[in-house]
Image: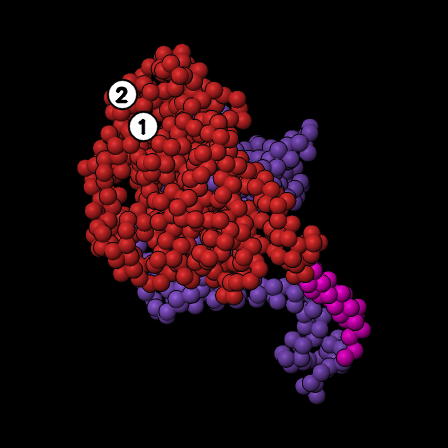
Chain colours: A purple, B red
Amino acid sequence: MTTTLAPATGLRARAATGTESARARWGRRFQHGGWFVAPFFVLYGLFVVVPVVRGLYLSLTDANISGDHTGFVGLDNYREAFQDHLVWNSLGHSVQFTLYVVPCIVVVALLMALIAHHITHLKWLWRLCFFAPFLLPSAVVGNLWWWLFQPTNGMVNHVLGIDTPWLTQKSTAMIAVVVATLWWTVGFSFLLYLAALQNIPHHLYEAAELDGAGAFQRMLHITVPNLRTITGLVLALQILASLQVFDQAVVMYQFGPGPEESTRTFVQYTLEQGFTSYRVGYASAISFILFLIIAAVALGRMWLLRLREEDAR
Amino acid sequence: MGLPGLTRRQLLSTVGGLTVAGSLGFAALGTGADALASGASTRVRYWNLFTGGDGANMVAMVDAFRKEHPGIAVKDSTLTWGDPYYTKLAMAAAGNRAPDLGVMHQGRVPGFAPGRLLDPWDMDLLTKYGVREADFNPVLWKRGIVDGKLYALPLDIHVQLSFYRTDVCRKAGLLDADGRLPTANSTDEWFALLKEARKQLKDGQQTLGLHAFDQNFSWWFFVAFYQQLGGGYFSDDRTDVTFDTDKATQVLEFFHQHVADGYTIVGQADGEAFLAGSPFVWEGNWSVPYFSGEKVGYGAQPLPPVFGTPATHAESHSFVLPHQADRGGAANEGAHLLAAYMVKNATAWAGGGHVPAYLPTFEDPAYLKLTPQSEYSRPAMEHPATEPRIWFAGSTGTLAKRIGPVVASSNVGSAKPEAAARRMKSVLEELLAMRNPMDGRTAAQELKGAAA
């Protein structure tokens, strides 16, 4: 009695037989969990899988915005993309942004979490201040920082006592976007770090203190190693998000590409191709290039993680 | 099935499903419900892109129309200007969900696939509602015609203006006996004006707001001054780029001099700086309601004819009929009536600073009393400088997105004017060779011989 087609209830069947086929096990699992995850799968299929497959198909056509004129062009769009200097240029800007913003977020979020964790007075106020910007819509953030970076009457220059044209010179344009993004999004990573800090057992610190470890040593040998998992998570999330940077840069540069086209990001270029030039086929192709890059980063991270786990074993 | 727990879930999901379906059903009903509620027999869906002072004006005009024509229920929707608007309009027309009436910048019409995404106007219906070609600015009317059919019924012409603050200019002794600024007919005269005005300013205040860094304004101002020099873009048969890099360099040097000499502060919020005491700003005429609302004494002229021939950048808001497979019937007639009403009641529209396309407005005493409109409207209309008429041109179109940043980079001094002019030419060459995604033809193939 190794195969029962439909065990009445899984638990009893398993108890009776002690073993069961993979199919039966799957059926049993589905009975218990399937209905809970089904809505997710339906939505995921409708709003992720179907559009991705359709996008892939469109990327092989010369479809325009009306869906018309959809001649199959094979890999022509991809061939064109590899020769299109603006594709590489805008991809470079997205990567540049990622390289600037991700380390800043990790460091600042950790510092903020340490402050909020150790502070004793008005704890809630610190947490609120650090997290609040994250709740703002990107359009608000973009406009706000556009004003703050104004050359003569902007607050940034006023406070620093300088007159740097932040938004209009190439050397500072991306930094301005990074600063705005940091202020806006660091709250999320801050929360992750704060939660992780609270999970580090207190007795570790006590033991270290008894052994004569100073504050810096405790930080270096207890806090940082214990935060390794969360740092990996923050890094991964931020890299994936940063490669898709779009709205804050677009708002701060009022839909323009920045000084000497130095802040036009990959997503912005995709949008321009699809929705200004109406080349949906081509826009789909270049968005697939970004999709592959992001997928490669995500897979690379998983691979690294597994290597590390194997090392640890 | 032996799954007692599921019945409740099934019940819940059924109820949920019914709720969703029901709300969708009511939403569908709603398409006719408001028309029925108002006792109207016809419903006209009308999309526009007017916000701010323009938006308030347009809403008031639609309300006035409703009062006069209770049999027509107008369902008007205002969408965000630029890409979002044009994307939505194109997709709605392609998906046969187009509104009965829409507004477009005239420069975008050739790229909007007349005949496929746009339907031509029914001239008999327009005549019936009192719209006659003879009453319109002929340049604007002609630009709305593609393949012999009218696709864009012009509402206005909107231009770039040189706004000046009367208080600062008076103190600087620049105004004439009528309290107006004399026209600068050369670059020397223009910079002399700026120099005098600057003496009245505090440190850190800019003399001229030039939107030096904005891709749209940069391109629009370029179009104006390049035309003052008589420059062109493409050969008549659309096979060659005839862009004159020497003339372009001259224009770009003129722009950059404002920055180099410190008259313009790059990145400044120009309109706000003007209200805060900066004597000059170059802005679209749509800023009139904004500036007037602040009770600042100011005047406005077309952009100064510093290269000899007057010309100021101009675009036109026009009414279009987004493509519907089954266009016709009462809604279509209502759309014609509404558009005819709007273009003929241009005095109300002109309050937003725009110059009416409907010529009889210029005899309306109420219109002639408007200031500063009276100062700029006639000369602006007489010397419009428009973008080349080609599928990738037009307000916030591909051309502006590609070439505007090049002008801006020269303005702010990060590219030499000559290099920028050469770059502009190569962008034009690239775009001319590009196929129109709407029909797969290049400009040379599709617009051979069309008037620029």
Q: Is residue A72 above or below residue A255?
A: below
User: Of A129 and B107, which appears nearest the observer?
Assistant: B107
What residue is pinned by disc 1? B304
User: Of A125 and A50, which appears nearest the observer?
Assistant: A50
Tell me the residue at 37%/53% (across/down): B145
Q: Quadrant of residue A63?
A: bottom left
Chain of residue at mark 2: B
Q: Residue A21 in the image: state x and y as whole percent.
A: 64, 81
Where does the magenta region start and end?
A: B1-27
Q: Are marks 2 and 1 on the same chain?
A: yes
- Mark 2 and mark 1: span between their CA atoms? 10 Å
Image disc number at residue B189: 2
Q: How many marks?
A: 2
Q: Residues within 10 Å of mark 1 (few under 14, many from 20)?
A: many
Disc 2 is placed on an element classified as helix
Q: Quadrant of residue B112?
A: bottom left
Report the amino acid beneath label 1.
Answer: Pro
Is label 2 in contact with label 1 (beta carbons under 8 Å)?
A: yes
Q: Is residue B318 magenta?
A: no
